[in-house]
Image: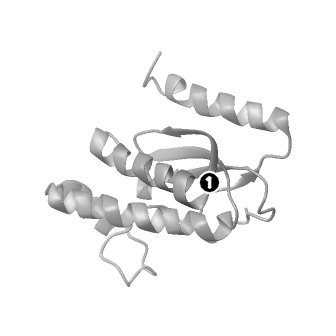
Amino acid sequence: MGRSRYRICYEKAPYFLTCTVLNWIPLFTRPQTAGIILDALRYRQEKIGWKIYGYVILENHIHLIVQAENLAMELPRFKSYTARKLIDHLKECRSERLLQQLAFFRKDHKRDRDYQCWEEGSHPQLIENEQVLRQKLDYIHQNPVQRGVCG
């Protein structure tokens, strides 16, 4: 789970997660890139059994509340898969500016790739009870409002 002190310890519990695009690059400003995330979430829901309580896709990060068996292993797979798909899409669309940013801000220890899409980690926060679940769902719903994306 990256180098974060936050860990997924209880495999059967839901977690509030934040996946941030490298250096907060606004990658999800087009329906196609957000669609890659939505397709990946739908697949995990249908084929892997993710229980998704809520999510929001903002221009440079996503918030999720997810419960899944072996989430600690599945979340990095989700990020790896979506990174590959996003980078392939950007190459296909010749989005040179975004690709240059993903290459420029790539962490030095990521020498096995030309681009890095996601920041490391996901800051997992255990949802311990219904009150915490409600608080995190409210946060997810209000996040785009506070950012001025919707009213």
- The amino acid type found where label 1 is placed reads Trp
Q: Callout 1: few (<14), some (14-19), or many (20+) C-alpha neighbours within 10 Å?
A: many
Looking at the image, how many numbered discs can be counted on the residues? 1
Residue 26 appears left or right of 127:
left
145 over 125 or under it: above or below: above
Residue 139 appears left or right of 35:
right
**Residue 118 x/y as whole percent:** 45, 61
**Residue 73 x/y as whole percent:** 62, 71
Q: Quadrant of the N terminus?
A: bottom right
Residue 6 appears left or right of 113:
right
Which residue is at a point 44% across and 54% down the rendered structure image? Answer: 40
Residue 89 appears left or right of 44:
left
Q: Residue furthest top?
A: 151
Q: Is residue 105 visible?
A: no
**Residue 4 x/y as whole percent:** 67, 66
Give the image's coloring scheme: one colour
Q: Which residue is mark 1?
A: 50
**Residue 50 x/y as whole percent:** 62, 54
6 over 57 or under it: above or below: below
Which residue is at a point 83% across and 35% down the rendered structure image? Answer: 130
Which residue is at a point 32% across and 70% down the rendered structure image? Answer: 115
Q: Is residue 103 visible?
A: yes
